[in-house]
Image: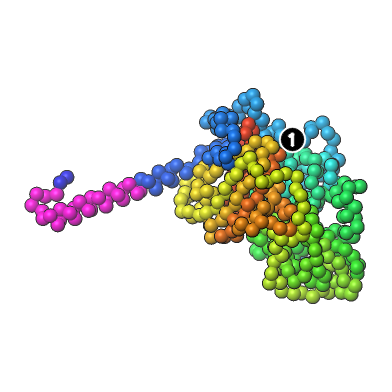
Amino acid sequence: MLPPRTASAKSRWAWFARRLGAVLGLVAVGLVGWMWWASVLPGSYSALDMGVPDFGGGAGSEAHAAAHAHAGAADGTAAAPATGETSVPDLIADPDRLADVHVELTARAERVSLDGGEPFDGFTLNGSTPGPTIRATEGQLVEVVLRNEDVPAGVTAHWHGVDVPNAMDGVAGVTQDAVMPGQSFTYRFVAEQVGTFWYHAHQASHPQVVGGLFGALILEPAPETDAATAAVTTAGVDLVAAIHTYPGGQRTIGGALGDSHHDAAPGDIVRVRLVNTDSTPTSAWVTGSSFRVLAVDGHDLVGPTPVDDHSVQITAGGRADLELRVPDSGAARVQVPGASVTIGPDGVEADETSAPREHLDLLSYGEPADVDFDPEAPDRRFAYDIGRLPGFLDGRPGYWWTINGGMGAAVPMYMVDEGDVVVMTIANSSGEGHPMHLHGHHLLVLSRDGVPSSGSPWWVDSLDVAHGESFEVAFVADNPGVWMDHCHNLPHASEGLMTHVAYHGVTTPFRLGRDTGNDPE
Ligand code: C2O
Ligand code: CU
């Protein structure tokens, strides 16, 4: 319709402006509607379709195109892999080898009451939370049967920090299907590392981990190795102390609320294995003794020196093994905000102090040493830039985390080949800190904000990247599979801060999506 012929030029302009406004409004609504529609995920999809292949300057795009088309078969069927491809379920430990350590874990959804705490609806493993501490010696084959008695959403066990074969990684929808009530799954892996690790559900992991589905895993050095000799002479008492906040803000250390006690004699040397099972970093500090940080994330530090008046910062998902000495009179106390454990003779109290103002900086702690690969000439170089943008994630409007500016299926999928040396720069401009965790590999910290690491080689599987910070890390791609690379602030992972490192030629028959029952976050 045209404006009336008699209308003045002015009202004719107003008429056009109104029409133009209406058209632009429709275009905007259409665009937002299209963004919404485009973000809605199918009921079932492959993890390999949730990212744009990023080759990091390395080879392999042709091989990937074939694998990708294959994995993303639209009919949802898991066809047998084409020649030259490996399917995730084949990436296992030697099936003919007998287990050296056998553990059975039964998961239950139940009302949990911690000693002296407020009951909550949570989860247990063999009737308790934390679940049993699993101990094995380097070289042993560990076999864990996980049964789900009645956890409605299903369960899995992920071996955080242990570079297990991919099929044993416990990620629902990527490396296995969630274990539904009445079902079980058997995990088998050889303990090739030594140190403090933990296991936790990787199905509906945010509610399940908070509610109690986790435990510690301690891998001890094989006898007659240097590490074993050192461990015997340095650790008289070995104390596993997971730090966990249960529903209702109930903070625990070593499974106990508030302040607890652990027996040790004056002069005892104690190894305290701190595990941060929460979603945010925690600081920990010691009174009554100086301490050394013997290991971080299951890697011994080289040349750790005594520390006073500093706290250690433990990344969400991360671990720190502290060594302290029980004083000749009195006791030592390991504190975290809201909880502590006193270590000393029965009935002896230790001072309580407020957190030291400064954190120990692991970038310069300990002595430099050689590592067994050369990060100077990497085969691939990746950027993992964390940001935040408004948009749609699986049809939900929100202010979501982005990786290299993309969200949902538009995040990068980091493609590698076995044997590659990979350098990754993790930068964060998202307004919040993120504890970044790569499955199946350990990362060597090269630099932070351009300052090279000058202390002990600092290996991590969980790394706090604060807003405004940038870390350069390196790893060797030596464990084929499809590996999650995500934020261990578990709500953040479900808000989009997760992607994968995928090896060329590895496909997964497992599916994600609302029709599959698999929901790793
Ligand atoms: Cu501790 Cu993907 O997890
Ligand atoms: Cu995060």
Q: Which quadrant of the figure contains the N terminus? A: top left
Where is residue 69 shown, x and y percent of the image?
54, 30
In the rendered view, tell whether residue 490 sits above or below residue 416: below
Picture quarter containing residue 500? top right
Q: Residue at x 87, y 59 (%)?
A: 235
Disc 1: which residue: 92
59 part of magenta stretch = no
- Magenta span of residues: 3-29
Residue at the spot 47% in from the left edge and 49% down from the top edge: 392
Look at label 1 and name its amino acid: Ile
Q: Which of the pair 213/22 is nearer the observer?
A: 22
Q: Left or right of 16: which side holds 386?
A: right
- In depth, the one of 367 and 494 nearer the eye is 367
Residue found farthest to the top:
83
In this picture, residue 385 sits left or right of residue 267: left
Residue 382 in which image quadrant: top right
Judged by its main secondary structure, the magenta piece is helix
Check the image and report above or below for 345 versus 302: below
